[in-house]
Amino acid sequence: MFELHHLSAHEQYDWLRRGDVSVRELTDHYLERVKRIDASVGSFVTVTADLARARADALDREGSTAAPLWGLPLADKDLVDRRGVPTWAGSRLSRGRVAETSSPIVDALDTAGTVSLGKTTTPEFGLTAYTESLIGRSTSTPYDQSLNAGGSSGGSAAAVAAGLVPFAPGSDGGGSIRIPASATGLVGLKPSRGRVPTQSGLTSLGGLAVGGPLARTVADAGMLLDAMVSPDSRPPRDLYAVRAAPSVEFSYLAAAVRGEGRFRIATTTTSPWDDTFDIGLDPSVLAAMSLTMEHLAAVGHEVEPDGVRVPVADYGRLFSVLWKAGASTIPAFGDDLDLLEPITRWLVLQGRALSAFDLASTLAGLTAYERTVIDAFSGFDAVLTPTLALPPRPNGWYDAVDAERNFEQQCQYAPFTSFVNVAGLPAISLPVHEVDGLPVGVQLIGRPGREDVLLAIGAQLERRLKWQRRHPPQW
């Protein structure tokens, strides 16, 4: 039987504009699904049903506008603030702080016409590649309730995959969009550094973090990215917008819908963690790579197997230092440190033990690493890697006592994502494969500022593989 969530976000937008469905009807449909289904997934930490209905009614009264996402529901990742709504950030330390103002990305998506249904789960301060925390239950991939959705945008990804929202904004400082996208069977795009003006990453140490979309289709991802870059459909005017290389294609939705072009694509299964930890690839991951290479060649791309190697240098040590330094600013002191999870507390204390020289030399080393990666990849339009080395991990799999072992497990699970943040390059995870009912993604890494190329290649693969037809049991 047909239901509204069976439509893509782009199709829902068309229905809203034509008046085939009201904003309130669409909002109520998703709120009912959240109430009925989310207990099995754990994607929401806070549901703001009354605020969502009031917002929907206001949009209906005003009537359809040119806002690029007018009337479409989504949810805020619980690392950002929405005025009047608690922000937990996955931590007991936050004590459910009620925000007095909204984060810039929240204001931008409100300007774009969206309706927020609430806040989605995240691990403590978004620091891990899985979504579990001491403030609530684990977030599962909708394809198997015993397996984790990944992190740190795990709640956002699980909500989209389960049909609780049509798409959702995430943030990615080391893989936090792409990791859960692979674990939940979604398209997840990490834009170039500075591409999203309201969430540029400049306030985060090293400029690692950037906002981006999680969606079921490439076109929906392009549509949401358009609004995140320019919520009022005008050229970006924010100062941070100049931080990203200019894109040839201003409309990412148009690039995704057209899906045109033939490109030179290298593949690699090497990672910068190979000399630091024991990195092994699951057979399902290798199968996904082979399948993708076959389809890329069939479309007409020039595919060069093992055409590049990801530079290793001293990456493992450098990135570890940067991650610890970033955690050191978490405002926990004295007895409040006991409120943190072991992995977070370890990162905080390790970070506070670093010297100014440690940090300065690390930033210099990672800047050099950024140039090395861009140079190594410069002969290709895109580089294909696995998104993850392993299938989704069981809830509770990560060591809850030994923080150092926990960090190693995260790197073994997701060794291919964080170096892209260091390099500032765009990357997209695509749900190309399914093994034993579980989704398996691959990652395409693009040239600086060329999100349009990644969307075009993704659209070509989507037409052939039709992953938008795969759904979890809750669908």
Image: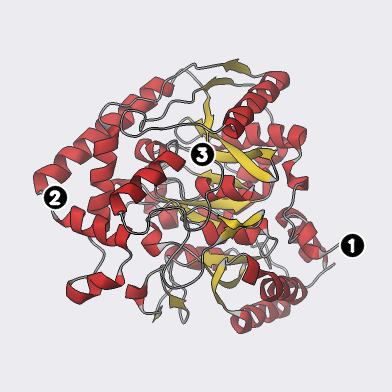
Residue with the mark numbered 1: 1
> Residue 127 in the image: x percent, y percent?
37, 56
Q: Distance between the Cα atoms at labels 3 and 1?
A: 35 Å
Q: Residue at x 72, y 22 (%)?
A: 299
Q: Is residue 414 in view?
A: no
Q: Is residue 22 left or right of residue 296?
A: right
Mark positioned earlier in the residue sequence (3 or 1)? 1
* Disc ID at residue 354: 2
Residue type, mark 2 in image: Leu
Q: Quadrant of residue 99?
A: bottom left
Q: Give the colour scheme shown.
A: secondary structure
Identify the secondary structure beneath mark 1: loop
* Disc ID at residue 96: none
Mark 2 burial class by Cα count in 10 Å: few <14, some 14-19, many 20+: some
Q: Distance between the Cα atoms at labels 2 and 1?
A: 59 Å
State the quadrant of the N terminus. Answer: bottom right
Residue type, mark 3 in image: Leu
Residue 451 drawn above or below residue 323 = above
> Do labels 3 and 1 touch, CB within 8 Å?
no
State the quadrant of the C terminus. Answer: bottom right
Q: Distance between the Cα atoms at labels 2 and 3?
A: 30 Å
Residue farthest toward the right in the current orientation of the protein: 1
Residue with the mark numbered 3: 388
Mark 3 burial class by Cα count in 10 Å: few <14, some 14-19, many 20+: many
> Residue 133 in the image: x percent, y percent?
43, 66
